[in-house]
Image: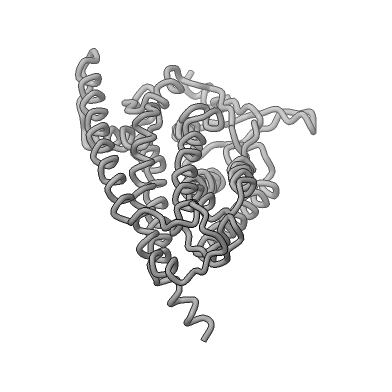
Amino acid sequence: CCNMESLIRKLETVEEKYSQVVFKTNATFNDPAPKPVVAFAIGGVLSLFGFLMWWHRVVVLKRKMAERQPPIKLTWNTLLRAYISCAIDSDSPLYTTISYGASSFLFLGAIQINYEWTLLAMLVFYTVTSLGETIRVLLALSHANSLADIVVTSGFLASKLRTVATELKPSNVYEDLGRGKTIVLMVFVTQVILISFVCIDMYQNDTNPCRDGTPGCPLAGTLGSWIFYVLGTFMACVFLLGPKTNYGESEQNPAYWLQLFLATKRSGAQVTWYDPIKDRHKEMSLSMRDGITWIRFFMSFVINGVGFHILVHALPIQVAAQSSLTGVVLRAVGMMYLVDLDDTPGYTLTIVQHPVEKTEKA
């Protein structure tokens, strides 16, 4: 009976839930939130501007490629990567803010209509968008045997791939091939569990106390919660474009994985590093068939791709659910902790060619 009542409650609109609440005070933050059409209208306008800006970015990128000497031929592979890069790169703060704000306001309107199904749609949407980086890396990998062969379609990637690199500097535990498997697995499991807790908490708490202590206030149903959601959207944009991400760089670090996978295509390639704890140099053979490297890549996608998107895009919902200003601060800090849990500079990895390979070529 209780489960059925809970399900019915979740399927109600925000306005229906709001009408059942008896508020303790007549404070302004207890007033009803703007209608869903307001959020949809704002999201729709931002989506239109975002699409026009994306298309302009594509046109500019095509022109730059045509002006190169010699001109770059746009194959389906290059064109698809160009579309993806122009859509997901955060090199333009204005474009990133508008595109993020568009999706955030559209989801706000949907939350006010049906909270449960909107959460599911958000999970699917951000999982799919997280695939952009992975698809971009795999497409480049499939049509290149070295960095010199790659047609770069991203400004961020271009800044890191200007020269053929022999040294790789991991930025998190999944990229650090010199880090032990046990600690990598422990960090991965911990992050998966904690991110899952965030998702479960959001699903179960579609109503929360208001700032005056009134229980059962619907999320985004009061003016105070609606404003907190907008504040959370702004905070998420700052997080995406601020120092934490090195001003817009991808958490998935596609340049690192592309360089590493291209090295695996070279026969006899190895990666070496110095272990200060054991005071000796170590090495590891690289191969396209090496499952460890692909597993690390998958872990990075799950945490720094899907997990990162869920945490950042869930921040407005988490903030809107708070009943105090301190709660807003704690949510923001907690989200940053989850994202940063795997971030640590690892051993500097040096890509070398096996001596036997050099002898044969000589």
Identify the image quadrant of residue 148: top left
Q: How is the image coloured?
A: one colour
Q: At 35% from the left edge and 58% from the top edge, which residue is drawn?
A: 110
- Which of the pair 185/273 is nearer the observer? 185
**Residue 338 in sight here:** no
Q: In the rendered view, would you say 20 is above or below 173?
A: below
Q: At 49% from the left edge and 69% from the top edge, which residue is drawn?
A: 21
User: How many numbered markers are drawn?
Assistant: 0
Residue 204's spot in the image, x, y percent? 53, 66
Q: In the rendered view, would you say 233 is above or below 54?
A: below
Residue 104's spot in the image, x, y percent? 39, 47
As drawn, which residue projects farthest toward the front? Answer: 26
- Which of the pair 11/184 is nearer the observer? 11
- Which of the pair 50/155 is nearer the observer? 50
Q: At 79% from the left edge and 32% from the top edge, which residue is drawn?
A: 277
Q: At 41% from the left edge and 52% from the top edge, which residue is drawn?
A: 127
**Residue 269 in sight here:** yes
As drawn, which residue projects farthest toward the bottom? Answer: 1
Residue 29's spot in the image, x, y percent? 50, 52
Identify the image quadrant of residue 179: top right
Residue 188's spot in the image, x, y percent? 61, 50
As drawn, which residue projects farthest toward the top? Answer: 69
